[in-house]
Image (cartoon, rainbow, N blue to C red):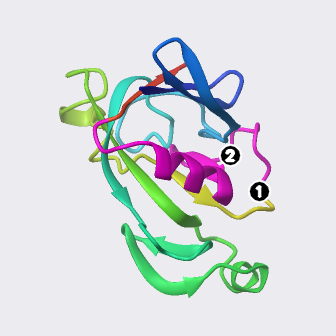
Amino acid sequence: MHIEIIVNTQTLTLHAEERTLMSFPVATASKGVGEQNGSEQTPRGWHYIRAKIGVDQPVNTVFVGRRPTGEIYTPALKAQAPERDWILTRILWLSGLEPGRNRLGTVDTMQRYIYIHGCPEEEPMGIPSSHGCIKMHNQDVIRLFDTVTVGTRVLIKE
């Protein structure tokens, strides 16, 4: 089983051998693709799910630093803090598998805190808009989260 994220089509597909198990629209980085620390771009290449965060948390749970804040996202909460980067519901934390490309040094996906995560439902999918992560609608990320395991490989390509 592996996940394939195609930036040009803004899609995430979960494959098992030659079969497609599920496919979802996503939103990758508004600044495009790239691996450098601080670039706010989505890193390419092979990764794996390092950690699954948010088991049994309610839909719209707000995370900061991979920990639930105790808040539940609402449009009213967003109006109070419009500048926040909303990481909601579930987090799949990625780690690179390719030294020099997306692992170690100034290109380390894990140290850049790149996730597949939930976001507010009103945010459109299919349009690059993240700060580097792969955003999904909450019900989609829950479905993916409940299907994959730590160690599942993730290929991000253009």
Tag 1 near tag 2, CB within 8 Å? yes
Toward the viewer: 146 or 78? 146
Quadrant in the rendering for residue 80: bottom right
Which image quadrant: the N terminus? Answer: top left
Query: Dot 1 lies on which element?
Result: loop
Q: Is residue 10 above or below residue 66?
A: above
Which image quadrant: the C terminus? Answer: top right
Left or right for 76, reference 81? right
Labels 1 and 2: the sequence-earlier one? 1
Residue drawn at x 60%, y 48% is 135
Within-10-Å neighbours for mark 2: few <14, some 14–19, many 20+: some
Left or right for 71, reference 53? right
Q: Is residue 129 above or below residue 98?
A: below
Where residue 115 appears, x then y in whole percent?
Answer: 44, 48
Where residue 109 appears, x then y in whole percent?
Answer: 33, 38
Query: Dot 2 lies on which element?
Result: loop
Residue drawn at x 53%, y 54% is 117
Residue drawn at x 25%, y 35% is 106
- Determine if the magenta segment contains residue 127: yes
Disc ID at residue 129:
2
Q: Is residue 51 above or below residue 48?
A: below
Left or right for 53, reference 106? right
Disc ID at residue 49:
none
Where residue 108 appears, x then y in whole percent?
Answer: 27, 36
Which amino acid, mark 1? Glu
Is any atom of residue 8 visible in this view?
yes
Disc ID at residue 123:
1
Toward the viewer: 135 or 40? 135
Toward the viewer: 30 or 27? 27
